[in-house]
Structure formats: C-alpha cells, structure tokens
Image (cartoon, rainbow, N blue to C red):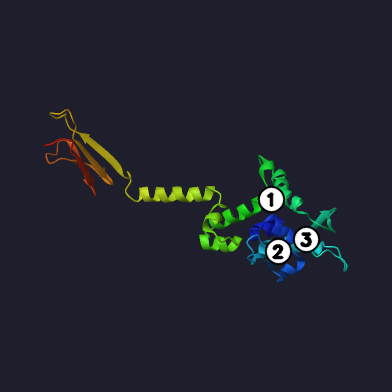
Amino acid sequence: MCIIAISGACRKQELKNINIEDIQDTGKTLIIKISNTKTNTARSFVVPETYYAICKKYINLRPAGGNTNNTFFLNYQNERCTKQSVGINKIGSVPKQIALFLNLPNANEYTGHCFRRSSATILVDAGGDLLSLKRHGGWQSSSVAEGYINESAANKASTANKIATAINSKGSLGQTSLIINSAPGPSNNERNLEISYNNIESAKNVTGSEPALIFTNCNVTINNYYNKI
C-alpha cells in the first residue's frame, strides 16, 4: 500500500476505490488508473520496475475463485489475503503502523494523508517542477499543490550550497564591507565612507616602507551628513 500510495500521491479514498481492473500489468511495471477522485479528474501513474516484484507478490496472494472481491486491497492475515476489503479507517492507520515499525518519534501524528504529502515532497526534491507536481497529484490549483510540499532538508541544503557557491566565487575573502568614519564636523555629525569590496590583498605603499591595502572591483558609497564638505 505504501508503494502504490506514494507512487501515485493517493488519497485514502482513492486507495480504497482501486479495483483489480484498474491495474495493468506490463510484466515489469504496473500502470494504475485512478478514476474516482476528489477533483473528478482521472489520472494514472506507474509503479516502477524497482517495486514491481513486491506488488506482484501481493497480487498473487489474492484468494482464487470466481467469487473473489474485485477490490484491489484485501485484508492480509496469516500470510494470505482474505476476501474482505480493506476499509478506509484501516488504510488511514497504515502510516502510523509504518512509523511504529520504524521506531519513528510521534508515530501517532502519521495519518493517512502522509502518503500524498510525502509523494509530493519526494517529487520536488528529485527536481520536479510545479507543473509535473500538479499532474502527478491531480491538483488544479498551484497554491494547493505547493501547500503539500514539506520544507525538506534537501531543499534547504540546495539553497545553502547556492549561497556558499556565490560567496566563494567572489574571492577567497568573500564580499566584505569596510567603514571609515571621519572626525566630527561643525554640527557634530559624521561623514561615513563605506567601501564594499570583493578582493583585497596586502601590498606596500609607494614609499615601500609601510604596508597598504589594494582594493579591486570596488563599490564605493559616500554618505554625506553635512550641509557642506
């Protein structure tokens, strides 16, 4: 259920409504159609080859006979499936069961909607754009689709790396500011000379006796607080 729900960003009700006829077995993947959706917009998705064997094993556990329930998700007990369909409340409890199995903190906070939110976040972390996200989950509103994306560590790390790259590309010292304050003037105001520079190196002045600083690629801003200089 976790594989199918995350592969298709499925809601609880959508998982409950999947029938065996909604699933096309290609021999390597499963193509699943979701017809009855909250937005009345049908969509389909693929369970990739990586997880095909696990899903196929579950399908093979379906009880034989012509009276088999047509619902895809059947109750699983004692290493076999019964003819009883899995109810929506049990579907909603599956994320909590997974969290408990993995010893995750606050397991009670994992609801049936975790599958859909996790699917959206994973897609965006992998490089999916807003359009692919809306198609994936069947969202018509961009703002609603964006609301399903958690603030992930991957996105934050990517942002931090971009900032660090931008800083490092400006020189070994990065971009710095140097503020020189003059002596107070007649009106007790100050005159500030702010120099923002990208690169700085040590050098000798024209006399060769004292060290000096050489600024390159400078942006100089002079703030004059006097009526007259």
Q: Mark 1 or mark 2, which has the lower sequence index?
A: 2
Instruction: Name which residue type carries label 3.
Output: Tyr
Tell me where residue 188 appears, x and y as whole percent. 17, 28
Amino acid type at mark 1: Gly
Q: Residue at x 52, y 58 (%)?
A: 142
Q: Secondary structure at mark 1?
A: loop
Mark 2–mark 3 Cα distance, whole angstroms, equals 10 Å
Where is mark 3, residue-wise? 58
Q: Looking at the image, is mark 1 or mark 2 nearer the viewer?
A: 1
Q: Residues within 10 Å of mark 2 (few under 14, many from 20)?
A: some
Choose top left, top right, bottom left or bottom right for residue 182. top left
Q: Secondary structure at mark 3?
A: helix
SS of the residue at dot 2? helix
Judged by depth in the image, the label closer to the viewer, 1 or 3, is 1
Q: Which residue is mark 1?
A: 112
Residue linked to disc 2: 52
